[in-house]
Image (cartoon, rainbow, N blue to C red):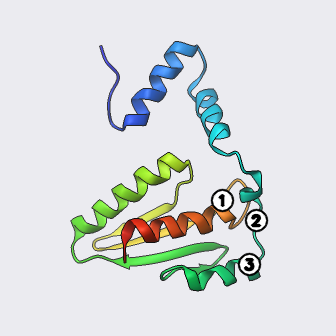
């Protein structure tokens, strides 16, 4: 009996747990620690530094301690496709935006919860999302 293949990484993570006799939490933590090599990217940025980065970001705003961008797509499925592409990239980077889908409007929200604010990782992910979305 094989593992479910909801997501490529999901099945691989379960297989890794089964082979290592570690808990899912331990495996995920080890995977995250391997991806987060640059601790400097985890420091909360001062508002001035975030504001200085905003002009280089397409449509992002700083509000309520987060970076936020709303995008209205031509059709519902265009938004869903964009979310899928962003989700794949976020999974690979182990830095996940909050995503809200309202028909053709998708809102991406970035904040590093573990650091307690906006970090360089959030600025970088906003740029990545801009590149992935292309609008």
What secondary structure is marked by label 2? loop
In the rendered view, does 35 fall on the left or right side of 107?
A: right
Location of residue 63 in the rendering, given as x and y in whole percent from the top left corner: 62, 80
The mark total stands at 3
Q: Which of marks 2 and 3 is nearer the N terminus?
A: 2
How far is mark 1 from mark 3, CA to CA?
15 Å
Residue at image point 59% right, 34% down: 28
Residue 23 falls in image quadrant? top right
- Residue at figure coordinates x 48%, y 76% from the top left: 69
Position of 96 relative to 73 (above/below): above
Q: 10 Å neighbourhood of mark 3: few (<14), some, or many (≥20)? A: few
Query: In the image, is residue 14 above or below residue 80?
Result: above
Using the numbered discs, state the Cα–Cα distance from disc 1 to disc 2 in whole angstroms: 8 Å
On-image quarter of the N terminus: top left
Residue 25 lies, with reference to residue 52, above or below; the image says above
- Which residue, given by chain and number where applicable, does mark 1 sit on? 112
Residue at x-position 60% and y-position 35%:
31
Along the line of sight, the residue nearer the viewer: 55 or 11: 55
Q: Nearer the viewer, mark 2 or mark 3?
A: 3
Mark 1 neighbour density, 10 Å: few (under 14) some (14–19) many (20 or more): many
Label whose residue precedes the other's in the sequence (1 or 3): 3
* Residue 56, quarter of picture: bottom right
Q: Name the residue under label 3.
A: 49
Secondary structure of the residue carrying numbered label 3: helix
> Where in the figure is residue 62, as x and y percent of width and height?
62, 80
Question: How many residues crowd mark 2 within 10 Å: few (<14), some (14–19), many (20+)?
Answer: many
Q: Do the residues labelled 1 and 3 touch (CB within 8 Å)?
A: no
Q: Where is residue 17 in the image (x, y as percent from the top left)?
A: 53, 20
Residue at image location 73% in from the left, 61% down from the top: 116
As measured in the structure, the alpha-carbon distance from the residue carrying label 2 to the one carrying label 3 is 10 Å
- Residue 118 drawn at (x, y percent): 68, 67
Residue under numbered circle 2: 44
């Amino acid at each position: 009996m094989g593992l479910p293949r909801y997501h490529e990484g999901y099945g691989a993570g379960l297989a890794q747990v089964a082979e290592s006799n570690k808990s899912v939490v331990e495996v995920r933590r080890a995977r995250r620690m391997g991806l987060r090599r640059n601790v400097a990217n985890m420091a909360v940025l001062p508002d001035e530094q975030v504001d200085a980065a905003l002009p280089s970001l397409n449509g992002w705003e700083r509000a309520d301690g987060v970076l936020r961008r709303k995008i209205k797509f031509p059709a519902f499925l265009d938004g869903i496709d964009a979310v899928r592409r962003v989700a794949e990239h976020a999974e690979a980077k182990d830095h996940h935006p909050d995503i809200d889908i309202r028909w053709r409007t998708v809102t991406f929200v970035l904040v590093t919860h573990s650091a307690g604010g906006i970090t360089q990782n959030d600025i970088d992910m906003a740029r990545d999302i801009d590149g992935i979305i292309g609008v």
